[in-house]
Image (spheres, grey):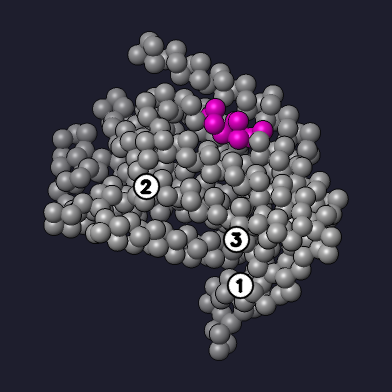
């Protein structure tokens, strides 16, 4: 009974955190673009004249979407048109269940893993639920009974299926190095030291894998410069016929995907919740010095490290969004099949050779 209560508390805590961060990310997206373009940005929404640099804007957006007309094309499929945004939104939330945001919180004799589900196939779980978002985009395009929406859905299907292969292969080298599909075990393995002083982070043992994984994930989430399925500056997009909260779910899912992918970058390649030289009892430095810390301080530092890394990669994705132009569709597919995919296979071969020698 106690374990069930703890699990439910972790689920609600993660859900509230994700939704809150996604709302803040809608503000970050606008404010960062404003700073880069030398303008004020979103700063109109206020409460009793108080604007707080535009932080009320996410609430204003939510209220606006809630009250807007919820339109369904007369000849569209009403059931699938409603189902599509749910299929796009739900998997992004579920993926976070296997991402560890801390080690273990000890309260007396009670040990609470700071992870909702510690699966021994966590990596496959991420690929499986990440692939479900494809159905949401394709169904949205088809159920709208609009040729431009259908074209956007077909673009999304081809792009996401292609780059899903690249995402999977780019991580094989990391799995070979750590010998597990369990995310928590991969994070623990990254707390070891290379050459006696360098943290065994994924970026150091798999630099090529990270360079391939990063653009493949951005393409998988359909962000600029890979946003052809949405076509914001065109009339082609799989959610052209969406409005109100149905459109809001697509919009919100995009920002939750940004947060989840940022968490994955930090977890797989930058030590996750680990702080260099920080262990359960405190800091142990390579030159022999030690600094013991209370358990709660260690847990706080680990959770803080995880969120700092996640915030950095959220910022980086938004920076790329407002810096790079969109690819042409032929360039997008060529990058996948003749660029990233062969290099991912090469990375697997090189990793195998190095492991055999070492």
Figure check: 60 above or below 238: below
Q: Which residue is mark 1?
A: 62
In this rendering, does residue 43 appear at all? no
Q: Which residue is mark 2?
A: 117
| Foreground pick, 15 / 278 | 15
Q: Secondary structure at mark 2?
A: loop
Q: Which residue is mark 3?
A: 252
In the picture provided, is 195 more to the left or to the right than 33? left
Toward which corner of the image does residue 202 lie, by quadrant? top left
Contact? badges 1 and 3 (CB < 8 Å): no
Q: CA distance from mark 3 to mark 2?
A: 24 Å
Q: Secondary structure at mark 1?
A: helix
Dot 1 or dot 3: first in sequence order is 1
Residue 274 in the image, given as x and y percentages of width and height:
32, 43
Q: CA distance from mark 1 to mark 2?
A: 30 Å
Figure check: 197 above or below 243: above
In this rendering, does residue 256 appear at all? yes
Residue 17 in the image, given as x and y percentages of width and height:
44, 62
Figure check: 29 above or below 45: above
Query: Quarter holding the N terminus?
Result: bottom left
User: What span is colored magenta in the figure?
Assistant: 162-170
Point 61% across, 47% down: residue: 133
């Amino acid at each position: 009974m106690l374990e069930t209560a703890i699990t439910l508390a972790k689920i609600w805590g993660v859900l509230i955190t994700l939704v809150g961060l996604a709302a803040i990310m809608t503000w970050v997206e606008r404010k960062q673009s404003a700073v880069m373009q030398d303008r004020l940005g979103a700063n109109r929404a206020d409460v009793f004249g108080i604007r707080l640099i535009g932080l009320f804007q996410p609430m204003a957006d939510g209220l606006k979407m809630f009250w807007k007309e919820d339109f369904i094309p007369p000849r569209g499929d009403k059931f699938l048109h409603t189902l599509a945004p749910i299929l796009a939104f739900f998997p992004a939330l579920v993926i976070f269940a296997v991402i560890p945001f801390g080690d273990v919180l000890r309260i007396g004799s009670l040990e609470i893993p700071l992870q909702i589900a510690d699966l021994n196939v966590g990596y496959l779980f991420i690929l499986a639920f990440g692939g479900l978002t494809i159905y949401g985009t394709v169904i949205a395009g088809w159920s709208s009974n609009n040729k431009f929406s259908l074209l956007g859905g077909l673009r999304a299907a081809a792009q996401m299926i292609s780059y899903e292969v690249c995402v999977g292969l780019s991580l094989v080298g990391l799995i070979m190095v750590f010998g597990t599909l369990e995310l928590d075990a991969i994070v623990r393995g990254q707390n070891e030291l290379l050459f006696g002083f360098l943290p065994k982070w994924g970026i150091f043992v798999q630099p090529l894998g990270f360079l391939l994984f990063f653009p493949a994930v951005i393409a998988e989430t359909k962000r600029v410069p890979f946003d052809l399925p949405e076509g914001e500056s065109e009339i082609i997009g799989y959610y052209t016929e969406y409005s109100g909260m149905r459109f809001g779910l697509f919009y919100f899912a995009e920002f939750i995907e940004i947060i989840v992918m940022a968490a994955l970058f930090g977890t797989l390649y930058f030590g996750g919740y680990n702080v260099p030289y920080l262990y359960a009892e405190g800091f142990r430095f390579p030159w022999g010095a030690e600094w013991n810390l209370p358990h709660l301080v260690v847990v706080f530092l680990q959770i803080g490290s995880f969120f700092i890394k996640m915030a950095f990669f959220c910022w980086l994705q938004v920076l790329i969004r407002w810096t790079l132009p969109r690819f042409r569709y032929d360039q997008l597919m060529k990058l996948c099949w003749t660029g990233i995919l062969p290099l991912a296979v090469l990375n697997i071969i090189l990793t195998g050779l190095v492991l055999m020698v070492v």
